[in-house]
Image (cartoon, rainbow, N blue to C red):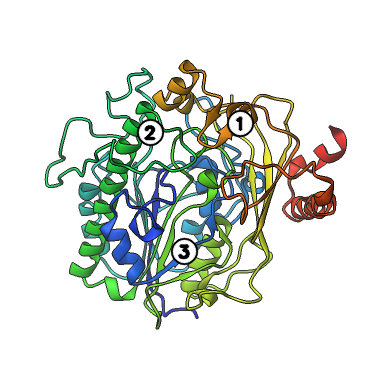
Amino acid sequence: MAMDRPNIVLMVADDHGYDGGCFGTTAPLTPNLDGLAAAGVRFTRAFCTSASCAASRSVLLTGLHNHANGAYGHTHGCHHFACFDQVRSLPVLLREAGYRTGRVGKFHHAPERVFAFDTGIPGAGRDDVRMSENCRDFLAGTEPFFLYWCSLNPHRDGRHLDTHPCRPNRFGNPDGDFPNDREQTYDEEALDLPAWLPDTPEARAEWAQYCQSVSRLDRGVGRLLRILRETGAYENTLLIYLSDNGAAFPGGKTTLYEPGMHLPLIVRSPTLQRVGHACDALTTWCDITPTILDAAGLTPDPDAFHGRSILPVLEEEHPEAWREEVFAAHTFHEITNYYPMRVVRADRYKFLWNIAHPLTYSSASDLWASPTWQGARRDGRATYGRRPVEAYLHRPRFELYDLRQDPDEVVNLADDPAYAALVREFCAKLKAFQQRTADPWLHKWDYE
């Protein structure tokens, strides 16, 4: 299903969970993403492999789990994680194939020579409409091109570490509209909170701000699509929209529970004959690089990546003979957030191995300081959403959940004798996955 050297645009949101109209929620409002889904295909079971920005993005642009590419956690500041020098990233491979490559917005990769782009387009902070406008000249150039468009929305603003429930706005632009872009605000009392958050004033205030930021992101996507049409590039452009990890709240980002790893994925291909449908193929961010290379006519070596092209299943709702499970591997967020987890996510069951389970689960600094979490601590809440706080902070070695019966992942079946055989089966699958992907944490099965 390879296309004749299409343009390629990879749009990556910063901490956008599975939230929006085309994802089945009443808020945030996402008319442009809804339109993109109507013109393409929406994947209902797409997952990041590590729920932390830099580690997840390293997987997107290499097709390798982060324990294999070396980017175990954040690149910036004292954290200093970086990919191995020998890694050949997606922009480099596309450049060698004759694509013009450009990037704009958040660039959370190191070293830069491994992720070399031809053009760095000026960003615009949280103003995604202006950021898209900054791409106009690049999009109007000679084809084919690859644009890596990375929003800063709806990431939490870690500079504001006070615990006031409403001020300042922790999800960007507290000062009103950007030029040529009007903010979409939300009534915090009228919002439906997701089940994994506590229903508190702090959570409601922050969720309203998060929704505002997602809508800002959506308008930036809309402007980018408009510019593609105005420059005549749209019809021959493969568009992929996704997020690096879940929403920046405790219980979401940095966890491999569903709110942290179950994410948006929309694909619009020029070759699609059928559009506007949903596909339930199990996919991960390891699939993105092989998919883009396939679209560019560069048949990906199946042994070079940990994922595979999803182009063959774009027309299908329920692909047969695709895959039965996907794997996730998270180790660090910041260097102070060491909590390695390895996960098998199948159709019905999800199995987590908390490698450092004797440790208290460590929280990212901005999530710890969030009013939502601090309010729960202040009130001495026994539960956070539907999960006991004790279970969130102190996790057992193994967790097993029946997602059909328990979508909130509350009832751990790992110690139930009736599921002992399934636990053994998942342990064997994890070991095989670790061997296959050269995971340095494989020895923990014996060493600790």
At label 1, which amino acid type do we have? Tyr
**Quadrant assignment, res 126:** top left
Question: Foreground mark, 1 or 3?
Answer: 1
Separation of marks 1 and 2 at Cα, in angstroms: 21 Å
At label 2, which amino acid type do we have? Arg
Tell me which residue sits at (48%, 24%) in the image.
Answer: 368
Secondary structure, mark 3, is helix
* Residue for badge 2: 156
At label 3, which amino acid type do we have? Leu
* Residue for badge 3: 94
Label for residue 408?
Answer: none
Query: Is the residue 265 above or below the residue 97 in the image?
Result: above
Instruction: Name, please, the residue furthest toward the left.
Output: 180
Quick one: 204 or 135, which is closer to the camera? Answer: 204
Separation of marks 1 and 3 at Cα, in angstroms: 42 Å
Secondary structure, mark 2, is loop
**Quadrant assignment, res 35:** bottom left
Among the two numbered marks 1 and 2 on one chain, the one whose residue lies closer to the N terminus: 2
From the image, which quarter does the C terminus lie in? top right
Count residues near mark 2 (Cα–Cα under 10 Å), then give few for <14, some for 14-19, many for 20+. many
Tell me which residue sits at (18%, 30%) in the image.
Answer: 175
* Residue for badge 1: 392
**Quadrant assignment, res 274:** bottom left
In the image, is 51 to the left or to the right of 206? right
Count residues near mark 3 (Cα–Cα under 10 Å), then give few for <14, some for 14-19, many for 20+. many
Tell me where residue 410 appears, x and y as whole percent: 62, 41
Tell me where residue 327 appears, x and y as whole percent: 66, 53
Tell me where residue 129 appears, x and y as whole percent: 21, 50
Tell me where residue 315 appears, x and y as whole percent: 47, 78
In the image, is 186 to the left or to the right of 313? left
Query: Is the residue 53 above or below the residue 175 in the image?
Result: below
